[in-house]
Amino acid sequence: MSYANGICFMNWKTLYLTAVVPLAVVCSWTANAGERWIEVVGQSQVTLKADLVRISAQVDEIAKQPADSKRAVDAKMDRVLAALNDKNVDGSTIDAGSLRVMPEYNYESRNRELVGYRASRELSVMVAADQAGEWMARLLELGINQLDAPVYVASDSQFQREQLLTLAFDDAMEKAERLAKAAGDGLGKVLQVEPMSYSSPRPMMAMEKMADSGNYQPKGQQLQQQLRLRIALKDD
């Protein structure tokens, strides 16, 4: 057993040390016969400005005959799609292909009574974030009778996810260098890289004075990444 700068190294068994430093380092320090390495967790995060919003909606109608209920919802959806096309909304972000037709029953009496057929169509569309309130109101005017909470996203989130991995790696290396230096050691090659977790909390919608101004203000979209590195130690 030997000591270096307050850290104990043991050549005959593995020693795990949890270190607490200003950067909230989580690490393992291992010394086996002929093998020494340090394991650290790097973290990175970024908050993106939401510039797009996905609106999900549904229209349904009840009629005596299935064909009549289908025609009714098709007519409303055609008006919606025409309005989106008139405003040059990107067609690749529009999904309106689903259709369901189901019998509708009245269960108030002991005997089940068929009252008609309910046809439903769903719509999903992506528009600019600052147009969320305008489009939600417009869809209701055109006959949409159900709107889900809008989901705000950042258009460059995929690029940022890739950058987060690099930033998390750099963060882990910086922590490892500090700890190795404190123990009087140097860093060798990277032995293992393990992505631990990636989180993208669902952006929420904040409404400011909606009744007066109709102003929908989205919060930012936060992305986080953690990465575990195992790095060989060497005599400095």
Image (spheres, grey):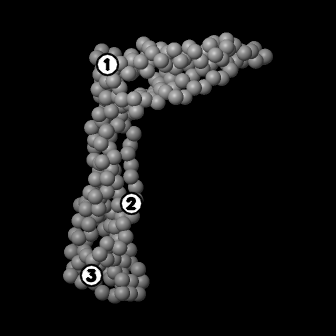
Which residue does the image show at 35% across and 34% down from the upper left? Answer: 152
211, 100: nearer the viewer: 100
Residue depicted at x 31% and y 39%: 155
Labels 1 & 3 near each other (Cβ < 8 A): no
Placement of the C terminus among the 4 image quadrants:
bottom left
**Residue corresponding to mark 1:** 214
Which amino acid does the dot numbered 3 rest on? Lys
Q: Nearer the viewer, residue 8 or 179?
A: 179
> Does residue 50 sit above or below 104 in this rendering?
below
Picture quadrant of residue 24: bottom left
In this figure, which residue is indicated by the disc labeled 2?
Answer: 195
Label 3 neighbour load within 10 Å: few <14, some 14-19, many 20+: some
Image: 82 above or below 230? above
Measured as percent of width and height from the top left, residue 225 is found at 34, 54
Residue identified by numbered label 3: 234
The quadrant of the rendering that contains the N terminus is: bottom left
Residue 54 visible in the snapshot = no
Q: Residue furthest right?
A: 111
CA gap, disc 3 to disc 2? 25 Å
* In-image side of 125 versus 7 (left or right): right
**Residue type for callout 2:** Pro
Q: Is residue 203 left or right of residue 3?
A: right
> Visible in this render: residue 166?
yes
Cβ–Cβ under 8 Å for marks 1 and 2 = no
Give the residue at x 38% y 60%. 195
Nearer-the-camera pick, 64 or 221 = 64
Q: Secondary structure at mark 2?
A: strand
Q: Position of residue 137 (x, y in %)?
A: 38, 17
Q: Nearer the viewer, mark 1 or mark 2?
A: 2
Q: Position of residue 231 (x, y in %)?
A: 32, 73
Question: Considering only vertical position in the picture, is 234 above or below 144?
Answer: below
Q: Residue 212: x and y, percent? A: 30, 15
